[in-house]
């Protein structure tokens, strides 16, 4: 495994993000070499980089893109983003119409996925039956 792969593995392991200075210390390389490796990962669109501060020093917070995508998937009901994200209303979830609507969308999405699986199974069954009749 080369240093680029090792750096990417470290970033993927830290699902909440990892500071760039942690990576160069873990890989026992200098910060310049680490910056070049991080640039390659950025150019390949595998990670994102945000400005951060670690122990009072300016550094970068790095996250793997696939981790971000997976997290956002959990906040989506179809095309509808979680209504609780950024909400500043007085919260009573059991009486919240917006939350009920979002949960309803989640259930619709799951039902739609389940119907797609049923349709695929029916297609496989019909193909299997057609094969038996030949
Ligand atoms: S449950 Fe309703 S009120 Fe509470 S945070 Fe979510 S959207 Fe806002």
Image (cartoon, rainbow, N blue to C red):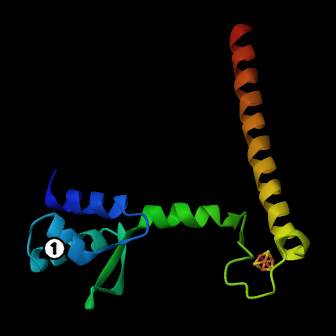
Q: Would you say 126 lies left or right of 86 here?
A: right
Camera sees residue 33: yes
Residue 44, quarter of the rendered image: bottom left
Residue at 88 percent across and 69 percent down: it is 94
The picture places residue 131, in percent across and down from the top left corner, at 68, 13
Assign the C terminus to one quadrant of the image: top right
**Rendered view: 44 above or below 118:** below
As drawn, is 53 to the left or to the right of 131?
left
Local crowd size for mark 1, using a 10 Å CA cut-off: few (<14), some (14–19), many (≥20):
many
Residue drawn 80% across and 42% down?
115
Q: Quadrant of residue 51?
A: bottom left
Classify 85 as above or below 88. Answer: above
In the rendering, at what x and y percent does residue 10 appear? Answer: 28, 61
- Image location of residue 54, percent across then percent down: 29, 84
Name the residue located 55 percent from the left edge and 64 percent from the top edge: 71
Q: Is residue 15 above or below residue 87?
A: above
Looking at the image, the residue that sits furthest to the top is 133
Looking at the rendered structure, the secondary structure element under dot 1 is: helix
Where does residue 112 sit, x and y in percent of width and height? 79, 49
Kindly tell me whether mark 1's CB lies below 8 Å from ligand 1: no
Q: Please name whichever residue, 91 or 41, is drawn nearer the observer in this view of the structure.
A: 91
Q: Disc count in the image? A: 1
Q: Which residue is at the front of the view, 128 or 6?
A: 6
Q: Which residue is mark 1?
A: 34
Q: Tell me if I can see residue 39 in this picture.
A: no
- Say which of 126 and 65 sits in front: 65
The image quadrant of residue 9 is: bottom left
Quarter containing ligand 1?
Answer: bottom right
For the point 25% across and 76% down, the residue is 20
């Amino acid at each position: 495994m080369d240093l680029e792969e090792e750096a990417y593995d470290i970033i993927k392991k830290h699902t909440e993000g990892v500071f760039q200075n942690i990576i160069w210390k873990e890989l026992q390389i200098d910060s310049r070499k680490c910056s070049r490796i991080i640039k390659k990962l950025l150019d390949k669109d595998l990670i994102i980089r945000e400005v951060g501060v670690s122990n009072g020093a300016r550094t970068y917070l790095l996250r793997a893109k696939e981790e971000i995508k997976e997290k956002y998937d959990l906040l989506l009901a179809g095309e509808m983003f979680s209504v609780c994200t950024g909400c500043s209303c007085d919260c009573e979830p059991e009486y919240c119409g917006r939350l009920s609507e979002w949960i309803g969308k989640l259930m619709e999405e799951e039902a739609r996925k389940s119907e797609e699986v049923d349709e695929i199974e029916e297609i496989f069954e019909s193909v299997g039956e057609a094969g038996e009749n030949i």
